Amino acid sequence: MNLTHKKIEEFRLLMHEVALDKELTDQRVLSVSRKLDVLINDYYSMATWSLKPAV
């Protein structure tokens, strides 16, 4: 498991913990969610980039 994948899992678990006692619109939940979104987007960008043929 690479570093980005580990970070995604950490933030996913953190978001779940924070959301247990907060509204889903709470700023703390949204902040963790945004960070998780960035990590997921970076992960997929790297995965997509590595699959593109060399020009």
Image: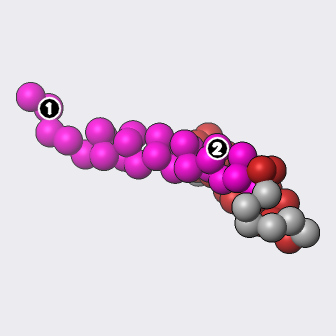
- Is residue 39 visible in the rendered image? The answer is yes
Query: Dot 1, how many residues are within 10 Å of its Cα: few (below 14), some (14-19), or many (20+)?
Result: few
Q: Which residues are magenta?
A: 29-55
Left or right: 19 in relation to 38: right
Q: Nearer the viewer, residue 37 or 55?
A: 37
The CA span between labels 1 and 2 is 31 Å
- Is residue 10 visible in the rendered image? The answer is no
Q: Nearer the viewer, residue 15 or 51?
A: 15
> Nearer the observer, disc 1 or disc 2?
2
Q: Quadrant of residue 17?
A: bottom right
Q: Which residue is tagged 2?
A: 35
Q: Which mark is residue 44?
A: none
Q: Main secondary structure of the magenta part?
A: helix
Q: Quadrant of residue 15?
A: bottom right
Q: Quadrant of residue 21?
A: bottom right
Query: Dot 2, how many residues are within 10 Å of its Cα: few (below 14), some (14-19), or many (20+)?
Result: some
Q: Residue at x 9, y 28 (%)?
A: 55
Q: Position of residue 14 (x, y in %)?
A: 79, 56
Q: Position of residue 24 (x, y in %)?
A: 74, 66
> Is residue 49 covered in magenta?
yes
Q: Nearer the viewer, residue 50 or 8?
A: 8
